Amino acid sequence: MSVADTDNDALISVYDRDARRFRTEWSAGAESATHSDKFINFHTPYLPPAEGHALDIGAGYGAHVHELESRGLEVVAVEPAAGMRAEAETLYPNSRATWLDDRLPDLAKVHALGRRFDFMLMNSVWMHLPQDLRSQGMASLATLLAPGGSFSVLLRHGPAPADRPMLESDTEPFLALAEAQGLSVIHREENGDELERDSVSFTRLILTKSG
Ligand SMILES: C[S@@+](CC[C@H](N)C(=O)[O-])C[C@H]1O[C@@H](n2cnc3c(N)ncnc32)[C@H](O)[C@@H]1O
């Protein structure tokens, strides 16, 4: 196990321990009808028809998993923090999503499913992946995307909060790794912070892999 793996373990244990607090803090906006509509309306052009395969990497307490399921998609959710998976189970008891205790960079359990995904989401996760694991992580992600599929990524920029370590997740290095793995950008936009924190901003990217 490398030092970087240990750092990611320590971070995941924060999400595990404080899952209920994070859910409460994030959910005020995230579970409102407006937020949900915004997420689905924005992503609609990139979603496959019902029964298509979707993957949410670092799915947290499952708010986006729920939204993707509501579009009839078959969702696999990857979340390494047990506390977060437990919050999802409490919040969405009727969910049919497959939850996996798995993580970047390998996503070994997802690969073991032997499936390619029509839509993939990685929302505010990349800043937790140590630099020396990112190239391997991108190779793993690119392999899981079906040709012609869409990969939506939210990159967080700005200082880390006091409760969790975070690394930079600048857009250009991310894109360089993505393009080296045969992914290309079809949409890019810069967004402010929905929780109105100073100095925090986000980049939304939609990537695709040619067929
Ligand atoms: C800021 S939260 C975002 C949660 C969710 N995507 C959302 O938008 O609400 C980051 C999530 O990434 C997960 N995470 C941390 N390291 C990870 C890794 N190596 N692979 C996959 N997920 C990871 C954490 O456990 C946490 O649930």
Image (tube, helix red, strand yellow):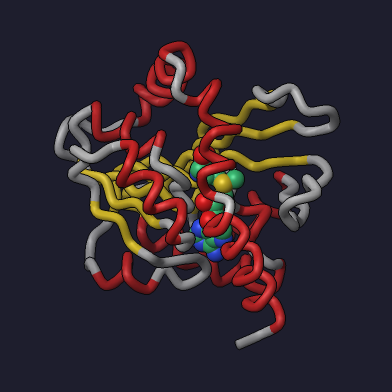
Residue 185 percent location from the top left of the image: 54, 39
- Residue sitting nearer the eye, 20 or 140: 20
Q: Residue at x 40, y 46 (%)?
A: 87
Residue 52 percent location from the top left of the image: 20, 40
Residue 158 percent location from the top left of the image: 81, 41
Residue 9 percent location from the top left of the image: 60, 71
Tell me: 7 left or right of 162: left
Pick out the residue farthest to the left.
Answer: 51
Where 108 sits versus 205, above or below?
below
- Residue sitting nearer the eye, 93 or 197: 93
Q: Name the quarter where the N terminus is drawn.
A: bottom right
Where 117 sits versus 186, above or below?
below
- Residue sitting nearer the eye, 135 or 93: 93
Residue 148 visible to the viewer = no
Tell me: 28 left or right of 168: left
Q: Residue at x 74, y 51 (%)?
A: 163
Q: Residue at x 34, y 51 (%)?
A: 77
Pick out the residue farthest to the top.
Answer: 34
Q: Residue at x 25, y 34 (%)?
A: 69
Tell me: 68 left or right of 5: left
Pick out the residue farthest to the bottom.
Answer: 1
Residue 177 visible to the viewer = yes
Where 105 sits versus 93, above or below?
below
Tell me: 122 left or right of 145: right
